[in-house]
Amino acid sequence: MRSNGTNGTIGIGTVVSPFQGFRCAMDSAIRMNDCEKVRIEDVTFLAAPGCAYLGRYMRGDNYYRYTIKPGPPPVGATEPRLLSTCADGLNIAFATKGPTIEGCRFSFMGDDSVNLHGVTFVVLERKTPQELIVGWPYSREQLATVIPTGATVRRLRSGNYEVPGTARLTAFEPLRERTPEHLKIIRSVWPRDEAGRGTAFRMTLAEPLGAEPGDFLDVPDNNAPGFAIHDCVFEDHRARGLRIMASHGVIERNTFRRLKMNAITIGAEYEFWREAGWVEDVQVRDNTIEDVGRDGANQSGTAYVLGAIGVFGRTDRESRLPLWPGNRAITIVGNTIRGCPQAGIFVAAAKDVQIRNNRLEHCFYRPGESAGKGRGLAISGPIDAQNAQDVAIKNNEIIGPAQPPAKQ
């Protein structure tokens, strides 16, 4: 189901099952582009070859309450389905306001429950101190409609993605022409995308930013700010519960059970997907997390989130430490975490973090000697905030192994 420019409601009691076999075609059960005032409630997704719901270029107040679970076996099958969707449960990017996600129940997906993110641009050319040509690897689509005039543009220093300066946006428009040099830079930054693909945009600023070709920029007002995720259940699926690269949000009273990777990750994805960006003003409170983080990828040398709840910065691997504290004003309070081989709470690349009144049971029982080693990371206990500044850790209750088990 595809929609462009929709205002409206899907429900009540709708069942969506657009795919019958095991075939990862990476299309979504519902995709909405350039929409606002969307309301999807009391819908059940039984199968999809990609995401259950994919939203792009979204504006306004959008509300979601739905269920994802495996549908009945296809005709002739003798065993129950292993998966519901092949990819994320809900994925929203390039949005001027974040969604309200309430009372959902997601299970057996092939990837994350929820992914909220924006865009990282590479600077292709500096016309003047206040006029830049920037690029990304996709078509123009409706991106200009969700890059608002007056928004803050952050300059990002390649490597650790420190923010050496910001400026206000006065104009943003796609260009029809791209030079061979523009495409060469785009291809070098996103080498997985096919050659010749990509779009250049003209970005005009109210103040000089000092950005040079090869630098990166992002626009936090495009990253789904102002989201709310509460009273949901995320269980029995691959990857992460929440993958949040959006600011000014609250995550509360949710339950996460038996997830292969982390329950909640908050922070900047600048290295591979370049989904942006540094996050600020997010509250994670009164959630319950049980038996997560057993996937071997969490214990690999390239892992960058080493706990059930994680604040992270995925920057260029060769930049190593110290991580720049780009995530700010994060509160983690009143959560219960039962069972995670690594830290219950892991904080890196952050400043001004409150970790209070959490209860951790049986965490840090098998952290992995190599976990994060390729990035210079390590964890030392059930609550770890070694690569962060101004972190207040108070009144947390820790039950279970204070140290990992000795080798047998």
Image: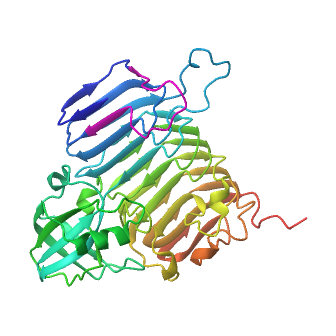
What secondary structure prevails in the magenta region? loop
Residue 171 at least partly seen: yes
Please provide percent x and percent y for residue 140.
20, 54
Q: Quadrant of the C terminus?
A: bottom right
Q: Quadrant of residue 103?
A: top left
Residue at the top extreme? 75
Q: Is residue 22 magenta?
A: yes
The span picked out in magenta is 15-32
Closer-to-camera residue (46/394): 46
In the image, what residue occupies the spot 65% across and 71% down?
A: 379
Please provide percent x and percent y for residue 70.
55, 27
In the image, what residue occupies the spot 40% across and 44% down?
A: 229
In the image, what residue occupies the spot 15% across and 55% down?
A: 144
Closer-to-camera residue (71/342): 71
Q: Quadrant of the N terminus?
A: top left
Q: Is residue 371 above or below residue 338?
A: below
Residue 395 at least partly seen: no
Closer-to-camera residue (52/313): 52
Q: Does the magenta stretch include residue 134?
A: no
Q: How is the image coloured?
A: rainbow
Please provide percent x and percent y for residue 92.
34, 46
